[in-house]
Image (cartoon, rainbow, N blue to C red):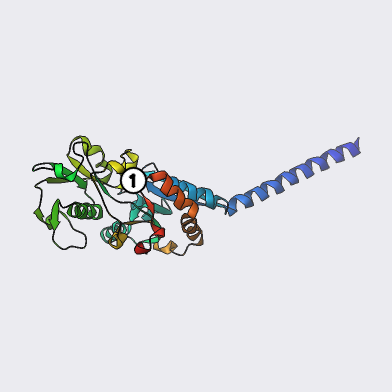
Amino acid sequence: MLKNRIKGILLIFITTLSLFILAGCGGNQSSNEKTVKVGICGANDPELEKVAQIVKKEGINIKIVQFSDYSQPNKALADGEIDMNDFQTYTFQADWNKKHHTNIVALGTTVIAPMSLFSKKITKLSQLKKGDQIAIPNDVTNEGRALQLLQSAGIIELDDSKIPNLHDIKKYNVKVKISSLDAGQTAKSLDDVTAACVNSGVASDAKLNPKNAVYREKITAKSKPYVNILSANAKDKNNPTFKKIVKAYHTKEVGDLITKEFHGYESPAWTYKILQ
């Protein structure tokens, strides 16, 4: 009887010890995994989802955090709510740092996403007439990019300026009215205006076909300021985990997905020599 009781106690002890060891091993496995919160603007980022699949094999868990407009991802990054973001261009980042006294840096390029002039009322530039209204994004860099797009299209002429604004318009070749609004609202404005300059991400979310654009931005060496980037706080510039994420982004697998998925909305920026 006593032997049986001792055996029972030993069995309980061994079982408990085994569970403790297993739990400890499980805890060590979890602690080796690194979770990286990456902010995006909008709801569609299949290339980042592909990157997440690639780095998952290296114990990196990417958690995608969605934001509704361009004013949020950098603030969240600076406040430590996220670790990286994937939504902005070099010029947008530089302007944000200057205005908000942040120290956000580029870790690597992602895509080049031409801005387009869309319309539900006209199909070609020659149909624009006096009094027609064109909507453009109201943040400094996207506003400047939109104005350069309109100049390239021959609608306006600008004074020389690195990042132009509405005051830099020196001549209207077509006397249109230009209004500014949040970049995320440009596609929604198409029912109310003649045309709108729309970022590719916004256009993609709104299911606007780039083939139906009235006019599209051309990719040249001057496009480099508008290349999209992965960003982080300066203190994380050499973070080895973040470098693995950039490396995974710059793979043929991800580049092929971008080409296939976006049908011309975006192209893998790291494959263009003129943008390096």
Q: Nearer the viewer, residue 274 or 99?
A: 274
Kindly identify which residue carries mark 1: 201
The quarter of the picture where the C terminus appears is bottom left
Residue at image location 19% in from the left, 53% down from the top: 147
In the image, is residue 244 above or below residue 213?
A: below
In the image, is residue 45 above or below residue 160?
A: above
Number of residue marks: 1
Question: What is the x, y in percent for residue 236?
Answer: 44, 62
The amino acid type found where label 1 is placed reads Gly
Task: Let me know if residue 62 appears in the view.
Answer: no
In the image, is residue 162 above or below residue 257?
A: below
Question: What is the x, y in percent for residue 29?
Answer: 62, 51
Task: Let me know if residue 5 appears in the view.
Answer: yes
In the image, is residue 242 above or below residue 122?
A: below
Callout 1 secondary element: helix
Q: Quadrant of residue 231?
A: bottom left
Question: What is the x, y in percent for residue 116?
Answer: 26, 47
Residue at image location 46% in from the left, 65% down from the top: 238
Q: Nearer the viewer, residue 228 or 29?
A: 228
Q: Nearer the viewer, residue 116 or 55?
A: 116
Q: Left or right: 76 with respect to 171?
A: right
The quarter of the picture where the N terminus appears is top right
Question: What is the x, y in percent for residue 96?
Answer: 29, 57
Q: Quadrant of residue 99?
A: bottom left
Q: Left or right: 44 with respect to 177?
A: right
Residue at image location 45% in from the left, 52% down from the top: 255
**Mark 1 surroundings within 10 Å by alpha-carbon count, few (fewer than 14), some (14 through 19), many (20 or more):** many
Q: Nearer the viewer, residue 227 or 267?
A: 267
Q: Left or right: 13 with respect to 187?
A: right
